[in-house]
Image (cartoon, rainbow, N blue to C red):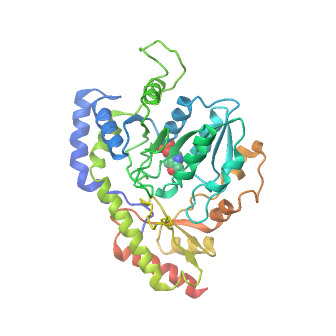
């Protein structure tokens, strides 16, 4: 049996005719940038995030970049974020001439350790970027409380978390100044190329983002500020409008797949023996759970690298997200961090990896994955 890390054919095959019809109309219509497909997408994504405004942009990275630009982050500012995320989260801060300031993660959720934030705040701190890693929201209540007390802006990196909900029921992107989504093909809602979205409840920020998206022009050819080309293509918006109708169903399938892995792993005894641990949707003391949308199903395992070789030899796809935390990346050496500074992120980088979780994954395939892992530990 073969189990790839991600197989999108289950998503795309049933929609193929609709895509082709839409592409035909686009070719004939000749409107390729910021047209009716984008407006429709912006409306539906704003609604899906429980927010008032959304603006389609060129990628998740550009969503983060333009969000920080709209909040006037630049030279001399500091921005606090997790040391463990996809590169874009920290890259955009540095590209604007600001200083990324890293915090360790909570070892259970892989999200920013909120207890670490406050002592990182200096008079230069301008914003906090909580990342909703793998599809579970960061612990937003304390982040927002700290931000309010210190007058800081909050940008949610929700690239992996469209439709995720905090324990109080609020959607990712709806709890902060600006929320950022990515429609990179591997995300839960993926385009046929690069695309992203910024989401806000603040009308003034929305107007500013809209101008920054087109080189800061308002009206056209008159520039009060310097923006960029952060536009989304109509062809991506058209694809996303078609795919977004199925998003709830795909998310449900991801959550069911996660629950099925839990059942299978529990039956093996691997969890009790400490060979592996599964992702947790954290509970508040009241027993209310975050809604995890499982963009990735990331597990922690002993002897990981040998296990990954064993999985590959048995045609099972997996991937390490992420092998090097930001504070140990060569490009951030100038920030002066060293190995040992953030032990939870460093051990996650050494011990964790993602298993296939995509919608359309079959029960037999999940059984095969867990049996294969079980065989590895029984033999060793
Ligand atoms: C994918 C991702 C991004 C960047 O999105 P792109 O659309 O690839 O530019 C940013 N942050 C996180 C956490 C991501 O997973």
Pick the residue in front: 360 or 26: 360
Pick the residue in front: 154 or 194: 154
Rendered view: 172 above or below 344: above
| Quadrant location of the N terminus in the rendered image | bottom left
Pick the residue in front: 104 or 121: 121
Q: Is residue 2 visible?
A: no
Residue 355: percent from left, percent from top: 48, 67
- Judge from the rendering whether residue 90 lies leftward or rightward of residue 364; answer left or right: right
Residue 34 location, quadrant: top left
Pick the residue in front: 205 or 239: 205
Q: Is residue 336 visible?
A: yes
Q: In this view, which residue lies farthest toward the bottom?
A: 378
Residue 346: percent from left, percent from top: 68, 61
Residue 47: percent from left, percent from top: 32, 43
Rendered view: 203 above or below 43: above
Residue 241 location, quadrant: top left
Q: At 61% from the left edge and 31% from the top edge, which residue is drawn?
A: 73
- Judge from the rendering whether residue 187 lies leftward or rightward of residue 246; answer left or right: right
């Amino acid at each position: 049996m073969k189990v790839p890390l991600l197989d999108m054919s289950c998503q795309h095959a049933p929609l193929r005719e609709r895509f082709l019809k839409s592409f035909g109309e686009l070719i004939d219509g000749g409107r390729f940038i910021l047209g009716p497909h984008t407006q429709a997408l912006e409306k539906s994504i704003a609604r899906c995030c429980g927010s008032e405004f959304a603006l389609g942009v060129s990628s998740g990275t550009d969503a983060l970049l333009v969000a920080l630009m709209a909040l006037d982050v630049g030279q001399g500012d500091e921005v606090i974020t997790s040391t463990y995320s996809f590169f874009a989260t920290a890259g955009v801060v540095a590209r604007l001439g600001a200083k990324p300031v890293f915090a360790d993660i909570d070892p259970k959720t892989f999200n920013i350790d909120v207890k670490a934030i406050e002592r990182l705040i200096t008079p230069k701190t301008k914003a906090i970027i909580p990342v909703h890693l793998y599809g579970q929201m960061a612990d937003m209540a304390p982040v927002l409380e700290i931000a309010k007390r210190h007058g800081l802006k909050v940008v949610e990196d929700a690239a992996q978390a469209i439709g995720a909900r905090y324990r109080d029921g609020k959607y990712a992107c709806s709890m902060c100044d600006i929320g950022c989504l990515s429609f990179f093909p591997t995300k839960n809602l993926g385009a046929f190329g690069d695309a992203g979205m910024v989401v806000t409840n603040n009308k003034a920020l929305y107007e500013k983002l809209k101008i920054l998206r087109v080189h800061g022009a308002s009206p056209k050819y008159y520039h009060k500020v310097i923006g960029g080309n952060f536009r989304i293509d109509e062809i991506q918006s058209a694809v996303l409008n078609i795919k977004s109708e199925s998003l709830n169903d795909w998310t449900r399938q991801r959550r069911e797949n996660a629950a099925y892995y839990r059942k299978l792993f529990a039956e093996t005894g691997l969890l009790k023996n400490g060979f592996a641990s599964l992702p947790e949707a954290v509970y508040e003391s009241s027993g209310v759970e975050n809604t995890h949308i499982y963009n990735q199903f990331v597990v922690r395992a002993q002897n990981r690298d040998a296990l990954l070789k064993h999985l590959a030899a048995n045609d099972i796809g997996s991937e390490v997200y992420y092998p090097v935390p930001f504070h140990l990346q060569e490009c951030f050496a100038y920030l002066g961090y060293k190995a040992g500074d953030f032990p939870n992120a460093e051990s996650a980088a050494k011990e964790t990896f993602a298993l296939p979780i995509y919608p359309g994954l079959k029960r037999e395939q999940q059984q095969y994955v867990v049996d294969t892992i079980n065989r590895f530990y029984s033999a060793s």
